[in-house]
Image (cartoon, rainbow, N blue to C red):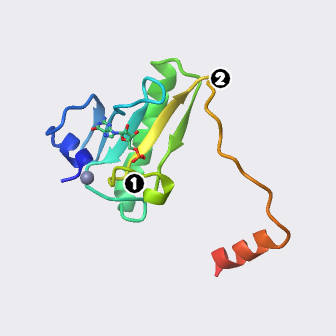
């Protein structure tokens, strides 16, 4: 059983914030800022392709609920919603989870670097995507 399935089953302790029949929201053990929340489907799924549309809908609605709590109850002005999809993207726990990371103005967390498209590159990508 994966570590998050063990958390769902209460075999590993966690700080649970909200649960219903489909999802669980709990505190990340190593927060970026205090109040960093993870929202997961109760039925094990590895990633976004793997999860059912019904469970994904429940999870994203849970993310919306938790975002409200971060703003209203913890008084953060903002938050990031992040889902690391597979190991190359930084997914360490192979059970789908959305991070809700509280943010403060000028908290020193930088956005990813990005770049302009080279000439013709966007058209190539678009062709592949629409193929
Ligand atoms: P990932 O890199 O897979 O997107 O993120 C996994 C997250 O799970 C990390 O932020 C990490 O701190 C958190 N985490 C790992 N193990 C545990 C645990 O046993 N309990 C809780 N509450 N969070 C965990
Ligand atoms: Zn699992």
User: Image height check: is 65 above or below 97?
Assistant: above
Could you tell me which residue is drawn at 46 percent across and 51 percent down?
90
Point out residue 25 in the picture as x, y percentages from the top left corner.
33, 37
Closer to the camera, 67 or 29? 29
Point out residue 52 in the picture as x, y percentages from the top left corner.
35, 62
Left or right: residue 12 versus residue 107 is: left
Left or right: residue 20 versus residue 131 is: left
Left or right: residue 16 versus residue 53 is: left
In the image as oriented, which residue stretches furthest toward the bottom? 131
Could you tell me which residue is drawn at 61 percent across and 32 percent down?
109
Dot 2: element:
loop
Mark 2 and mark 1: span between their CA atoms? 30 Å
The quadrant in which residue 26 appears is top left
Mark 2 / mark 1, whichever is N-terminal: 1
Could you tell me which residue is drawn at 47 percent across and 36 percent down?
100
Point out residue 46 in the picture as x, y percentages from the top left corner.
34, 59
The residue identified by callout 2 is 105
Q: How many labels does the image show?
A: 2
The quadrant in which residue 73 appears is top left
The residue identified by callout 1 is 56
Dot in front, 2 or 1: 2
Point out residue 34 in the picture as x, y percentages from the top left corner.
43, 23
Beta carbon of the mark 2 residue lies under 8 A of ligand 1: no
Closer to the camera, 104 or 67? 104
Closer to the camera, 82 or 109? 109
The quarter of the picture where the C terminus appears is bottom right
Could you tell me which residue is drawn at 36 percent across and 33 percent down?
28
Dot 1: element:
helix
For mark 2, does the 10 Å Cα neighbourhood hold few (<14), some (14 to 19), or many (20 or more) residues? Answer: few
Beta carbon of the mark 1 residue lies under 8 A of ligand 2: no
């Amino acid at each position: 059983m994966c570590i998050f399935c063990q958390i769902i089953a209460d075999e590993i302790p966690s700080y649970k914030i909200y649960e219903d029949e489909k999802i669980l929201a709990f505190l990340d053990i190593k927060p970026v800022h205090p109040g960093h929340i993870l929202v997961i489907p109760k039925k094990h799924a590895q990633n976004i392709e793997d999860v059912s549309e019904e469970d994904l809908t429940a999870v994203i609605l849970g993310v919306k609920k938790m975002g409200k709590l971060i703003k209203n109850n913890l008084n953060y002005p903002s938050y990031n919603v992040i889902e690391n999809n597979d190991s190359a993207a930084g997914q360490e726990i192979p059970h789908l989870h959305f991070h809700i990371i509280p943010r403060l103005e000028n908290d020193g967390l930088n956005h990813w670097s990005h770049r302009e498209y080279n000439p013709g590159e966007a058209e190539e990508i678009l062709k592949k995507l629409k193929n």
